Image (tube, rainbow, N blue to C red):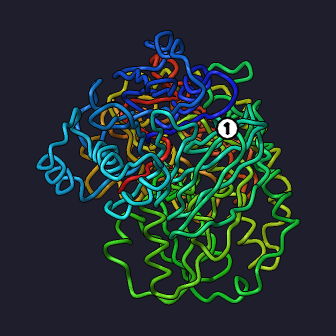
Amino acid sequence: MCGIIGYCGLSQAAPVLVKGLRRLEYRGYDSYGIAVSNRDIAVSKRQGKVSEGERDARSIRGKIGIGHTRWATHGVPNDRNAHPHTDCRGDIAIVHNGIIENYAALKRDLLERGHTFRSDTDSEVISHLIEEHYTGDLMKAVEDALPLLEGSYAILAIARGEKRIVAARQSSPLVIGMGDQEVFAASDMTPILEYTERAVFLEDGDIASLDPRGVVIRNSGRVVVRPTELIDWSFDDVKKGGFRHYMEKEIYEQPEVFSNTLRTLKREEVPKWLRKVKRISIVSCGTSFHSGLLFKYLLEEICRIPARLEFASEFKYFPPPLSELVVGITQSGETADTIAAIKVAKSYNCPTLAVTNVLGSSITRIADHTFYTQAGPEISVAATKSFIAQLAVLMHIVDELSGGTLTESLERANRAIEETLLLDMERAVACCQDAAHIFFVGRGPLYPVALEGALKMKEISYIHAEGYAAGEIKHGPFALLSEETPVIALCTPGPTYNVMISNIREMKARGTPMIILGEDGDWDLEEIADVFISLPSHDLVTRILAATVALQLLAYHTAEALGRDIDKPRNLAKSVTVE
Ligand code: AGP
């Protein structure tokens, strides 16, 4: 969702801001803008892609500036509603991520007091409130204005004649990059990585003054010190490196991501209390929900630990009776629903555990303990390597809690992912690319994989795809089967193998084109299948991983054949920071 970038230093700000906005594009946006302070504050903003108006924006001169990519929530996407927003005189400019819940009442009062609004956004109230409190000290004005706001925000503000940026955070991420005589601020590290690896993560309630000499942070009226952390992601990690899309690059990084994550985890102690848990609740969204479903399956099947899985968005409003460990799984660490669910768990005094990919992200500041996935920055909106890395963490936990049942399989897993990446998807793509609907079916641990395969397919190819537990297909969806509706069936050895074959035959009898993912040498399946994809798997762990990667490839190549905007699918944001 919205992205923020700020620069204050010895170089021209506009080129740094524009480049930063390009790096933030992956979060999803519909309009963008920058404001640069020189003698006056110059603003350039518009609806559309950064590349379309980049030249105008770059030409603005000045060494202090703020920029924003907007994902519309209040007010349609257009030039006027794009950020930055200014006060009545154009002396103060702000960019804002989050939602100001009481903006309507604030706006009504500000209008009554004579302020002129130029947009339909909730954010514009912030620049006018700062204006009302401004007496030549931007930091003080922001400190005085913020208590009036209800909701979530990451804000950057500049004022004419002041050689600094003021930043503030409440429930919306904001990181400061510490350079050499220059300082950056952003929603995440991706636009900062090429300048510095030193980062300071602001906490809720922090208000910071940033200038080339350094940063002063205040919280509740007092100066506070936040640690400077070294971020070991490199700038190369956020480049495409010869691949056509970030998604393709990220799919091919998975063998390394899986083994790096496991290697890092092996150096960490599993907390003692985790070994004693009797029940676990899991909260997450989207792809992270699917890794949660696999975790539930493995915990119950292998560790015999009862586990409950909830959509984070439901859990917040309808929390079940709780006393157990609550695990929040989130790639970004910023998904508003997952953060809210973990806060609810804490309000019940439940121990909490985060599984996330982003150092210093919001969830790591709330949860009692964090396990990090080592996926590196994931730029493509569609989650791939972060899912595989989540599985590495979750399978590692299961392995630890079950006395090493998965150790050998986990060691072989890397190889299986590598071999899966060599699979040829051409015939399967040909079968899918003209379909209006596709079903993905699996059973047991391959049911979450089917759900994830369907999610990948729909989000990047725009083909309507549904994941089903194969046994459920007969309870309604059967009515939709036809020669035009391919079914992707995951069928590997295990307790449901025979019943799965029966399901496949029943579907086949309706004329449905069957793409079957099974194991090498399964002649029966090959005979039934219209397209057979042979997975290089031999146990539970490698079946889950190989099937996942194969379905990622199928979605990717189908979307590519259809000419879709693979890394930035329409209407989607990488990180959903509003509920
Ligand atoms: C997956 O491809 C999607 N981009 C989406 O479902 C994502 O997994 C979901 O929004 C959760 O994000 P998180 O892991 O950062 O919390």
Badge 1: residue crowd in 10 Å (few <14, some 14–19, many ≥20): many
Q: Residue 44, relative to residue 269: is it above or below?
A: above
Q: Position of residue 22 (x, y in %)?
A: 55, 25
The amino acid at mark 1 is Ser
What is the x, y in percent for residue 556? Answer: 55, 29
Which quadrant holds residue 531? top right
Helix, strand or loop status at disc 1:
strand
Q: In which quarter of the image is residue 116?
A: top left
**Is residue 468 shown above or below 93?**
below
The front one of 303 and 173 is 173
Q: Which residue is drawn at 67% across and 76% down?
A: 302
- Drawn side of residue 123 relative to residue 349, left or right: left
Question: In front here: 385 or 453?
Answer: 385
Describe residue 262's horizontal placement relative to residue 13 as left or right.
right
- Is there any visible trace of residue 419 in the rendered image? no
Furthest toward the front, the residue is 135
- Work out whether residue 480 or residue 575 is closer to the camera in this orientation and state it: 575
Q: Name the residue under label 1.
A: 534
* Nearest the eye: 509 or 95: 95
For the C terminus, the image quarter is bottom left
Q: Residue at x 38, y 53 (%)?
A: 578
What x and y, as percent, mark residue 65? 53, 31
Please say if 570 is above or below 564: below
Name the residue rendered at 39%, 33% in the picture. Answer: 84
- Whether residue 186 is visible to the viewer of this picture, yes or no, is yes
Q: Which residue is drawn at 31% across and 38% down?
A: 87
